[in-house]
Amino acid sequence: MSTHPLPLTASASDLQRKSREILKKVQADETPVLILKNNKTEAVLLSPRLYTEMSEKVEKFEEFLAKEAIQHYSAEKKDKKLKKLNTVEELFET
């Protein structure tokens, strides 16, 4: 498992004034940069490689959750624990 350094921060004004320098840092070090406006995160800059890596991890995790849900459904179906609902309200009945 790869580890990534803590993100750097830059203000929105810094990004306007020092965009080349900030982008070089993101690309060279693959360090995320949080862009702040009024001390709140407005955006995050990532290297293309880091963005792709994170996107692939999210996709794999979503696939894992979907497979887990299918397995749970199959087990419930096999044990005849599924109940057909006729209304949305039945979802919230205890």
Image (cartoon, rainbow, N blue to C red):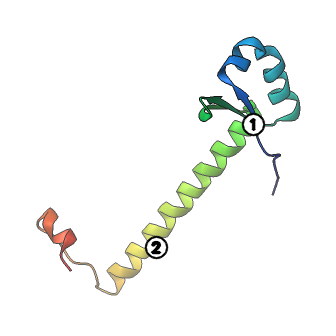
Which disc is residue 12 wearing? none
Q: 29 and 10: which one is in front?
A: 10
Q: Earlier in the sequence, mark 1 or mark 2?
A: 1
Disc 2 residue type (three-letter): Gln
Q: Position of residue 3 (x, y in %)?
A: 82, 52
Quarter location, residue 8:
top right
Classify the position of the N terminus by image quarter: bottom right
Disc 1 to disc 2: CB gap under 8 Å = no
**Which residue is depicted at the point 83% across and 46% down?**
5
Q: For this view, does 75 lie left or right of residue 62? A: left
Q: Nearer the viewer, residue 60 or 44?
A: 44
Q: Residue furthest front?
A: 38
**Quadrant of the snapshot with the C terminus:** bottom left
Q: Is residue 35 left or right of residue 65?
A: right
* Residue 63: percent from left, percent from top: 54, 57
Specify few, some or many for label 1: CA neighbours under 10 Å numbering under 14, 14-19, or 20 or more.
many
Per the image, the residue denoted by label 1 is 32
Amino acid, disc 1:
Pro
Seen in the picture, residue 17 relative to 69 is either above or below; the reply is above
Q: CA distance from mark 1 to mark 2?
A: 37 Å
At x 74%, y 39%, the residue is 50
Q: Is residue 40 above or below residue 59?
A: above
Residue 25 in percent (x, y) is at: 85, 27
Residue that lies at the very extreme toward the bottom in this rendered image: 79
Label 2, secondary structure: give it: helix
Q: Residue at x 72, y 33 (%)?
A: 46
Which residue shows up at 80% across the image and 29% down it? Answer: 26
Mark 2: few/some/many CA within 10 Å (<14, 14-19, 20+):
few
Report helix, strand or loop for mark 1.
loop
Residue 83 higher or lower than 65, as above or below: below
| Disc 2 target residue | 71
Find the residue positioned furthest to the right.
Answer: 28
